[in-house]
Amino acid sequence: MRRDDLTQHTSARPLLEIRDLNLDFGTPRGCIHALRNVSLDVPAAQVIGIVGESGSGKSTLAYTVMGLLPENADVTAGSILFEGKDLLKMPAQARRSLRGDRLSMIFQDPMTALNPVRTIEGQMIDIQHHEQGTRGEKRARAIDMLRRVGISDPRNRIGAYPHHFSGGMRQRICIAMALLVKPVLLIADEPTTALDATLEVQIIHLLKDLQREIGCSVLFVSHHLGAVAELCDRVAVMYAGEVVEQGAVRDIFHNPGHPYTRALLECDPGRIRKSTRTLPTIPGEVPSLLGSKKGCIFHTRCPQAFNRCLQENPVEYRIGVDQVARCHLHDEERLVSA
Amino acid sequence: MSALLRVEDLRVRFRTMGPLKALATGTKAPFIDAVCGVSFEIRKGETLALVGESGSGKSTIARTIIGLQRAVSGSISFDGQEIEELSGAERKPYLRRMAMMFQDPIGSLSPRLTVRSLLTEPFRIHGLKDRDAGAEAERLLRMVGLPADFARRYPHQLSGGQARRIGIARALALNPDLIIADEPTAGLDVSVQGEVLNLLARLQDELGMAILIITHNLNVVRHMTDRMAIMYLGRFIEVGSTERIFEHPRHPYTEALLAANPEPDPDAVLNRIELKGEVPSLMRRPSGCEFHTRCCYAQDICSRVFPEPSASPDDAEHSFRCHFPLERERAADIVEDR
């Protein structure tokens, strides 16, 4: 029910609008086109999942929004509108003041995301540098937040160093830090990948509860389909630097429109009920992103590829109310039905 | 079928402090028991899985079997011969018949050796210099489905899935009777994960070796293994045939682990048992049943009395350590589909 209420808001202007984003990495071997024509909306107070395999550009997209790209990255086209302002045209200083205030991030590896030589207390007070208030007030807020993410005895444990905590606890602390500044957009880059399965469930539930409580939007990057299905309202599927399909979570999982999404869902061993010796795979390999590409990026591995797929890069075809897929098959369908 | 590997009452201990500090602080037991009286056997051609969260001792068992770690007590016999007491040189002929695939696919390959020398290293170590290295490397590459020109590559030129295949090829080099695969799919994408598991299954069908799989991912286990053992704090808490345990887990921890894998379906019924807290520290083992601190069915007796293993009334091979084993079968939809 709750989900349906939320989708009503989509008529209003989204919090984050990514339009035709293109990004290259300069390497000695030439330009790697890491993101191509990526368009994505993050409406207010929703959780948007980005799924894809390694090298599909999902983390690069998250880092681009956050403005944490390495020096050899070059945004060649497109815009990222955050609350109506283009992040890419903003002066560095203005962009910096957004980070840790309106925007915050949870990183993949909780073991390395915290400073090992400083106490949790110092790090949690530092992160509130945009906020008003005395050190004591900030400390009180930090303790309160630690309690909310489920750290017992936070009053004493706030003085501990990161190595005193286990991996799951550290990820909780990272979440507490990211939410301490009350961001409007939280970017979570594979926050559960480094954790055990039972902890993964706990962290997903914690994120969901806190998101509802604070009312922020979350951009949740993951390669784990199960986690995305459970947490997200909308999903974007990425393959080799392109968003090949996006839509509401139910549509994507129940009625995938792109052959890649279908293949990815079939591969998930959690979906296979019958005992089998051979698991489904996606034959072939992800194409190299060096140099220019002609046609659909998935055509080399697509079981349904035809002539047009080799020649022409598909645009986003609308399927259903709220679902788009970059696949020529949907153009054919439209012709038939017309 | 006779047992290929028999492990009896294995106990592995790690020191937590030096003898002086133990004396000074009055610590009676300056060590932790990472593996605590574990017994199991693997028959020829069989696949057994050790499942558990990080720190449950599953990798320690593997390291002890191949002699990278010494046991404090217990016996390991391979093909009828006790090997735990043997010295390094005496052990060598037995080690030749066991092979290990290490957890980190790229990290376990020396960065300065080519794939060809990596693949033929086992022959050099075991004094089989008369073999034609080039031909052997080519044979092994073909076996794992990689082109012959990979022999000239270095590990950094391999993707995660390719490095995994090289790891498998290396393990197969001496035609072992037993392969120990430590997290064979960790860090791989779902599509590649399927490829690696299919390859292992195919090679097992062709060559007939036994496999010991160590993993925390139950989905991997389900399609690959004949039997499984679930570990918690260095002990087996449930052992039985994979099919049986998936249908009817008796230990609450097993049930929680099975439920911890989020379904790639947004409408999946969430009758999930979420585990509270984290794995307790090995230095402070809980009294009684070691799982009682996280168990949602725990009663008085659980915190006082250590449960002895008991067998399932209808299946003698299925045993578990629990005062109140679960009576009901798992969620009906899964059983029906099988």
Image (tube, rainbow, N blue to C red):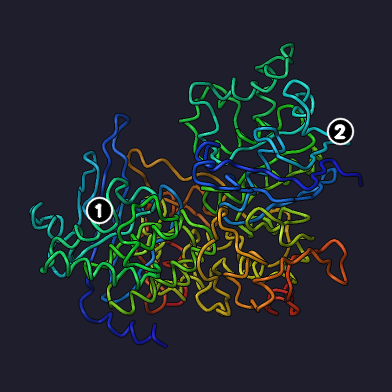
Viewed as shown, does residue A251 lie left or right of A186?
right
User: Which quadrant does the C terminus of chain B fall into?
Assistant: bottom right
Residue A79 in percent (x, y) is at 18, 59
Residue B234 locus on image (x, y percent): 66, 53
In the picture provided, is B26 more to the left or to the right than A57?
right
- Distance CA(mark 2)–CA(mark 1): 59 Å
The image's mark for residue B10 is: none
Residue for badge 1: A64
Q: Hey, what amino acid is under mark 1?
A: Thr
Answer yes or no: is residue B308 visible: yes
From the viewer's side, name the closer residue of A39 and A119: A119
Can you say whether A120 is above or below B147 in the image? below
Please name which of the two marks, 2 or 1, marks the residue nearer to the observer. 2
Judge left or right: residue A113 versus residue A301. left
Residue that badge 2 annotates: B81
Q: How far across and down, in percent of the image, does residue A266 sit? A: 58, 62
Q: Residue furthest top?
A: B130
Q: Residue B319: x, y in percent?
A: 80, 64
Chain letter, disc 2 residue: B
Q: Amino acid at mark 2?
A: Gln
Along the line of sight, the residue nearer the viewer: B187 or B22: B22
* SS at circle 1: helix
Disc 1 chain ID: A
